[in-house]
Image (cartoon, grey):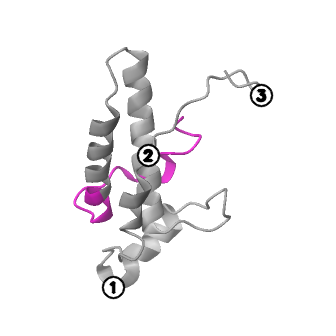
């Protein structure tokens, strides 16, 4: 339990830094002559509370994937199903690749909220 509000603190899943760094220079495939990027920044990109800067696509994808796997790990641990960190890392990296390249996307509210205090 944390001493401030009496809630159980959650271990947060983190994608491997070396994996995420591969995407530092990659351009996001927004399309639609810039309209997709405009909609993304207007609707889904959040202000990073640590840096005070607006997220780039790679940051949003990382936040969403980390949030999904944090939630999944908590559920698996709470139900004594056995968390496999190596398999989770592999699956999270695949999810990151697919979202980054827009092969699949979570719902818009998921892009906006996942990985924030709203979902934890």
User: Quadrant location of residue 23?
Assistant: bottom left
User: Is 58 in front, or is 119?
Assistant: 58
How many numbered marks does the figure carry?
A: 3
Residue under the point 43% across and 17% down: 78
When the figure is inspected, residue 78 is found, relative to residue 55, above or below; the finding is above
Q: Earlier in the sequence, mark 2 or mark 1?
A: 1
Q: Answer whether residue 103 is magenta in the image.
A: yes
Label 2 – label 1 distance at C-alpha: 30 Å
Q: Which residues are magenta?
A: 97-120
Q: Position of residue 110 (x, y in %)?
A: 42, 47
According to the picture, the residue beneath numbered tag 2 turns out to be 66
According to the picture, the residue beneath numbered tag 3 turns out to be 4
Label 3 – label 2 distance at C-alpha: 24 Å
When the figure is inspected, residue 25 is found, relative to residue 62, above or below; the finding is below
> At numbered mark 2, what does the secondary structure look like: helix, strand or loop?
helix
Q: Position of residue 6 (x, y in %)?
A: 71, 21
Label 1 – label 3 distance at C-alpha: 48 Å
According to the picture, the residue beneath numbered tag 1 turns out to be 33
Q: Position of residue 60 (x, y in %)?
A: 46, 59
Q: Earlier in the sequence, mark 3 or mark 2?
A: 3
């Amino acid at each position: 339990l944390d001493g401030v509000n009496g809630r159980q603190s959650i271990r947060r899943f983190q994608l491997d830094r070396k994996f995420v760094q591969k995407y530092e220079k990659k351009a996001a495939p927004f399309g639609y002559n810039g309209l997709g990027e405009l909609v993304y920044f207007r609707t889904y990109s959040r202000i990073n509370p640590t840096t005070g800067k607006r997220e780039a696509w790679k940051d949003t994808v990382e936040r969403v994937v980390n949030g999904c796997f944090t939630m999944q790990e908590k559920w698996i641990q709470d139900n004594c199903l056995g968390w496999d960190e190596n398999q989770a890392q592999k699956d999270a990296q695949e999810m990151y690749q697919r979202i980054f390249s827009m092969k699949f996307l979570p719902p818009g509210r998921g892009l906006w909220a996942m990985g924030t205090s709203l979902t934890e």
